[in-house]
Image (spheres, rainbow, N blue to C red):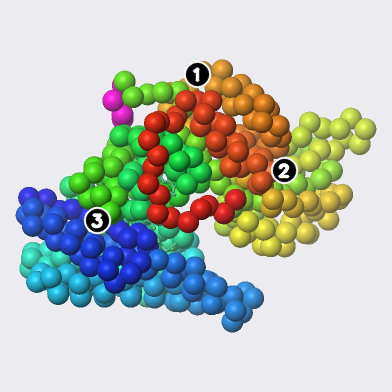
């Protein structure tokens, strides 16, 4: 018999009744003869509530105290779920990140996991206990509490599964698997039986928040067999995420994703000479700012200047403007322009490699809908277009249709509508 890691998201543990239901699902896995480690998120919208509470106390709370605050949500769930499992007659123990030894880098609010200690986990499993671990949180080597970024409990689960060499990691959530796009936007989106790590990584990074991107990264790195499945339909096997899909299920486009959490920055009229981009992006990198799409315009003949445009997370805009102020002055830029009324809409598919027609089809379908493309970026298996935020939903619908991703069924959706 094997070791199974299960993860239950916020919607799955939103009420006492749902926690009892999760306890039954955990016990079912244990009764199959498996050792079970369960990772849980905070109940329902607890994390959002705590973020709001902090904003009512301070306009810019420190990241350290935010982590101290947000990590409490998961501790409530682990205690309650453990009580529910115990009440149903099984041995269980809850553990927070410090007790397990989920060691992260010393970065607050989006720390990466460096190591997961397995000693105490194995001890408790050998004692026959079900272990309930707090997702989303970690601890630095110096004992500071960190969090992994919103949605990070998925990553906690996969990292534990990798460290303990689990036979499987099951991510239980409020949809039945990974769909061709967010079923809240396109109700006839199709559930994917299989999706490759690479495609899932792109989809997750590009806004399909059904999985935390770093969870997929870790699963790929350590070859963890990963499933996304429904808490409310435990017999449904959901979607398997794996190294290589079966040959016959490759279509050119596997899925469509949208992300409205970015802002576009344009540094206008900078000199067209070596070192300008290096100066801008080195300064941003030095402060740990991730930059996504980048475009440098063709140099204007009249004054030998061009514009450098790029996107960053909306949360980083203030920090970026601070960093850019002295640089823009030094480069005599005429303006630094910010637009956060944008969304990035992307198509992803391993089957689009070497098929140039796919990009043209994407652009034409957006043009037919009267949607203007502000920036484009591509990789081997994805094409992203930046559009106005109000066009994001329509763009997703059109692309889903043009690449024939829909099915006859209507997905059952329990979460709130995405906020584009
Ligand atoms: P949890 O709280 O269980 O972690 P999340 O809200 O983080 O759940 O993720 C599940 C949600 O992700 C679904 O309710 C769904 O609306 C959304 N979602 C976005 N893109 C996709 C997709 N491609 N496939 C499935 N779900 C998606
Ligand atoms: N509770 C955290 C969040 O809401 C982590 C998670 O749910 O994965 O982002
Ligand atoms: Mg999630």
> Foreground mark, 3 or 1?
3
The label on residue 309 is 2
Residue 320 place in picture, x, y as percent: 68, 58
Judged from the image, the secondary structure of the residue bearing numbered disc 3 is strand
Which residue is nearer to you in this view: 53 or 100? 53
The residue lying at 45 percent from left, 34 percent from top is 255
State yes or no: Cβ of the residue under disc 1 lies below 8 Å from any atom of ligand 1: no
The residues colored magenta run 243-247
Disc 1: which residue? 354
Q: CA distance from mark 2 to mark 3?
A: 42 Å
| Classed neighbour count for the residue bearing mark 3: other residues with Cα under 10 Å, few (<14), some (14–19), many (≥20) | many
The reply to whether the C-beta atoms of the residues labelled 3 and 1 are less than 8 Å apart is: no
Residue 1 place in picture, x, y as percent: 7, 50
Disc 3: which residue? 6
The reply to whether the C-beta atoms of the residues labelled 2 and 3 are less than 8 Å apart is: no
Judged from the image, the secondary structure of the residue bearing numbered disc 2 is strand
């Amino acid at each position: 018999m094997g070791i199974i890691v299960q993860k239950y998201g916020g919607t799955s543990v939103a009420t006492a009744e749902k926690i009892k239901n999760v306890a039954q699902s955990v016990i079912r896995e244990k009764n199959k003869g498996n050792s079970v480690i369960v990772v849980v998120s905070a109940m329902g919208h607890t994390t959002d509530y705590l973020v709001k509470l902090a904003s009512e106390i301070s306009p810019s709370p420190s990241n350290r105290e935010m982590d101290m605050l947000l990590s409490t949500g998961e501790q409530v769930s682990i205690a309650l779920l453990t009580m529910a499992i115990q009440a149903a007659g099984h041995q269980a123990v809850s553990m927070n990140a410090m007790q397990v030894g989920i060691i992260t880098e010393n970065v607050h609010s989006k720390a990466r996991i460096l190591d997961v200690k397995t000693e105490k986990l194995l001890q408790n499993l050998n004692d026959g206990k079900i272990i309930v671990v707090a997702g989303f949180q970690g601890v630095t080597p110096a004992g500071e509490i960190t969090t992994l970024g919103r949605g990070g409990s998925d990553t906690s689960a996969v990292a534990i599964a990798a460290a303990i060499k689990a036979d499987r990691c099951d991510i239980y959530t409020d949809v039945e698997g990974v769909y061709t796009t967010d079923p809240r936007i396109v109700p006839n989106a199709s559930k994917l039986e299989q999706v490759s790590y690479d495609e899932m990584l792109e989809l997750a990074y590009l806004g399909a928040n059904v999985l935390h991107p770093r969870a997929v990264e870790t699963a790929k790195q350590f070859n963890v067999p990963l499933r996304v499945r429904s808490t409310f339909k435990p017999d449904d096997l959901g979607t398997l995420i794996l190294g290589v899909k079966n040959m016959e299920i490759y279509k050119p486009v596997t899925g469509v994703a949208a992300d409205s959490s970015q802002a576009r920055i344009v540094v206008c009229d900078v000199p067209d000479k070596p070192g300008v981009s290096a100066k801008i992006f080195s300064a941003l990198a030095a402060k740990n700012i991730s930059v996504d799409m980048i475009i440098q315009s063709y140099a204007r003949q009249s004054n030998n200047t061009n514009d450098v445009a790029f996107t960053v997370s909306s949360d980083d805009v203030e920090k970026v403007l601070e960093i850019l102020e002295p640089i823009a002055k030094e480069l005599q830029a005429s303006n630094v322009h910010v637009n956060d009324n944008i969304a990035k809409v992307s198509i992803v598919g391993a089957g689009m490699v070497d098929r140039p027609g796919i990009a043209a089809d994407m652009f034409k379908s957006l043009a037919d809908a009267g949607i203007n493309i502000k920036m484009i970026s591509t990789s081997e298996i994805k094409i992203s277009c930046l559009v106005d935020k109000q066009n994001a939903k329509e763009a997703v619908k059109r692309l889903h249709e043009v690449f024939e991703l829909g099915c006859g069924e209507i997905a059952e959706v329990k979460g709130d509508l995405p906020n584009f």
